[in-house]
């Protein structure tokens, strides 16, 4: 079947797993490209794809997911800055810290690394950042360093004042930061990927592995193994930790820091790199760290007992206040209103949470449940779909989506979603 053939090509060439992104997403992208080329037959499009490198590039643009923002998972950047200042700088007088950001999308990630290092006291000359992404549009945008409000999420965007100039249309990154990052358009799965480069002290490869097939993941991990210095640190996305632990790297045990080092390491001390508590409140929070963590893993009705993996973005370790509490309170109120049948008010309260944090998984999920309660499956599907987009391992949202697809008579999607949940459960050892 030509459609399956296109899926296989994408899997082979760029590693994309049709199951993780959803075959329907690929089908939509293919249809859009067929329309753009005035083609009616998938077979004819497949033949065009084989002949034309330019069309192949367009299809890649249509299927990749460029979602990113500055200081995504802030704690990882806080950790990086503190590590660079306290552990790396004192031992590397005159050296340059080498950083690699794979799947850097439109540049928010590597530029956040640069800002974190500058904030930690490293001058621009003391670090170099190489960034690679397969998407030509993403790399083009990254090189410009010009961003709209969607790139600045979470409560703390104070860095924008220090490193950007505001214009009528958006924010321009200062040239001094822009210059610290070299953007390359590269496929991480290509055999030549940075084949001449010496090892890097820091590698970020976040929110790519989750979209890849098992074989492609293995290849990427081979690349990491080749390019990570003996004492290097490897940062992944929140959902990607289980994929890396299997490869013999050691998780760095810091709250909400998703990073690894090689099993034997002399540079990263076993002693944790934590910000020193400053004010009274912070000291209390330090003591109550465990309790506050438990608090953060609050769940909503019908959801699995698992932590909110994305809410962390607006919960910087160094903040004196506890901004996520406000969101939790709002979400609790939304739940209570929903339980009482006041669905309009519940939606309004969810909206307030999302105004503060556009990537709040549980707020999206709750909105989905509320629309289900209103028998509005179309909107429910949108909200639940967004929850799954933000947390691809959200069992409950996936289960509801399967039911909605079933009601719609889309047995194929429903089965695929259920199988996805099954695989997740198997992976987590839950049967
Ligand atoms: C969700 S974004 C991740 C951005 C950033 N790392 C983050 O976590 O915010 C995924 C990126 O992976 C890129 N990508 C997908 N397949 C790739 C490949 N085979 N080689 C290099 N980049 C790839 C996409 O173009 C997209 O920009």
Image: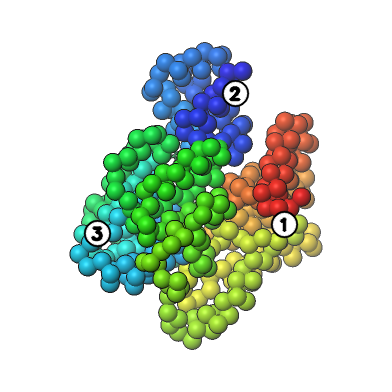
User: Alpha-carbon distance for marks 1 and 3?
Assistant: 46 Å
Are circles 2 and 3 on residues that touch, CB within 8 Å? no
In this picture, residue 255 sits left or right of residue 132: right
Q: Distance between the residues labelled 2 and 3?
A: 47 Å
In the rendered structure, which disc, 2 or 3, sits on the residue that comes first in sequence?
2
Check disc 2 and report the residue beneath it.
4
Residue assigned mark 3: 96
Graded by Cα atoms within 10 Å as few (under 14), some (14 to 19) or many (20 or more), the crowding at tag 2 reads few
Question: Which residue is drawn at the image coordinates 35% and 35% (left, top)?
Answer: 192
Q: Is residue 260 above or below residue 423?
A: below
* Residue 295 image label: none
* Comparing labels 1 and 3, the label whose residue is closer to the camera: 3
Q: In this view, does 19 lie above or below 76?
A: above
Identify the image quadrant of residue 177. bottom left
Residue in view at x 40 percent, y 34 percent: 190
Residue nearest the observer in this picture, 45 or 187: 187
In the image, 192 versus 102, the foreground residue is 192
Marks 1 and 2, how far apart at CA: 34 Å
Residue neighbourhood size for the residue with mark 1, other residues' Cα within 10 Å, grouped as few (<14), some (14–19), many (≥20): some
* Disc 1: which residue: 303
Please give the name of the residue rendered at 48% of the width and 54% of the height, measured from the top-left corner: 236
Residue 427 on image: x %, y %: 66, 49
User: Residue 233: image x %, image y %?
Assistant: 41, 59
Q: Which of 211 and 195 is in front in this view?
A: 195
Residue occupying the point 20% across, 64% down: 94
Name the N-terminal-most of marks 1 and 3. 3
Element carrying mark 3: loop
- Are discs 1 and 3 less than 8 Å apart at CB? no
Q: Using the image as rendered, state which of residue 272 and residue 304 is in the foreground.
A: 272
Helix, strand or loop at label 1? It is loop
Comes first in the chain, label 1 or label 2: 2
The x, y position of residue 150, in whole percent, is: 45, 51
């Amino acid at each position: 079947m030509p459609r399956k053939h296109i899926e296989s090509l994408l899997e082979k060439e760029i590693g994309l797993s049709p199951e993780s992104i959803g075959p329907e997403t690929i089908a939509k992208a293919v249809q859009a490209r067929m329309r753009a080329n005035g083609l009616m037959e998938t077979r004819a499009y497949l033949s065009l794809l084989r002949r034309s490198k330019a069309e192949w590039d367009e299809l890649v643009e249509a299927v990749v997911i460029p979602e990113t923002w500055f200081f995504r998972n802030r704690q990882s950047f806080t950790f990086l800055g503190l590590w660079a200042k306290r552990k790396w700088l004192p031992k590397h007088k005159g050296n340059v810290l080498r950083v690699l950001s794979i799947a850097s999308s439109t540049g928010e990630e590597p530029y956040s690394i640069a800002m974190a290092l500058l904030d930690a006291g490293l001058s621009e000359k003391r670090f170099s950042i190489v960034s690679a992404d397969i998407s030509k549009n993403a790399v083009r945008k990254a090189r410009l360093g010009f961003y709209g409000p969607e790139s600045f999420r979470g409560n703390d965007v104070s860095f924008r004042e220090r490193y950007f100039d505001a214009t009528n249309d958006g924010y321009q990154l200062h040239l001094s930061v822009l210059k610290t990052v070299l953007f390359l358009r590269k496929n991480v799965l290509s055999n030549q990927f940075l084949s001449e480069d010496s090892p890097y002290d820091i590698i970020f490869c976040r929110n790519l592995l989750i979209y890849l097939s098992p074989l492609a993941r293995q290849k990427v991990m081979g690349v990491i193994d080749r390019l990570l210095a003996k004492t290097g640190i490897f940062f992944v996305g929140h959902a990607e930790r289980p994929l890396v632990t299997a490869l013999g790297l050691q998780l760095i045990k810091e709250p909400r820091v998703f990073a690894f080092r090689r099993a034997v390491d002399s540079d990263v001390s076993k002693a944790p790199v934590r910000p020193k508590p400053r004010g009274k409140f912070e000291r209390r929070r330090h003591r109550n760290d465990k309790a506050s963590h438990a608090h953060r893993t609050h769940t909503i009705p019908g959801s699995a007992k698992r932590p909110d993996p994305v809410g962390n973005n607006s919960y910087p370790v160094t903040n004196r206040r506890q901004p996520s509490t406000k969101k939790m309170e709002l979400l609790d109120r939304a739940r209570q209103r929903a339980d009482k049948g006041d669905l309009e008010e519940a939606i309004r309260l969810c909206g307030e949470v999302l105004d503060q944090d556009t990537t709040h998984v549980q707020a999206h999920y709750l909105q989905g449940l509320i629309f289900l309660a209103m028998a509005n499956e179309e909107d429910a599907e949108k909200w639940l779909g967004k929850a799954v987009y933000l947390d691809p391992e959200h069992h409950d949202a996936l289960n509801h989506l399967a039911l909605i697809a079933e009601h719609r008579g889309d047995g194929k999607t429903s089965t695929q979603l259920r199988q996805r949940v099954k695989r997740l459960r198997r992976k987590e050892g839950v049967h």
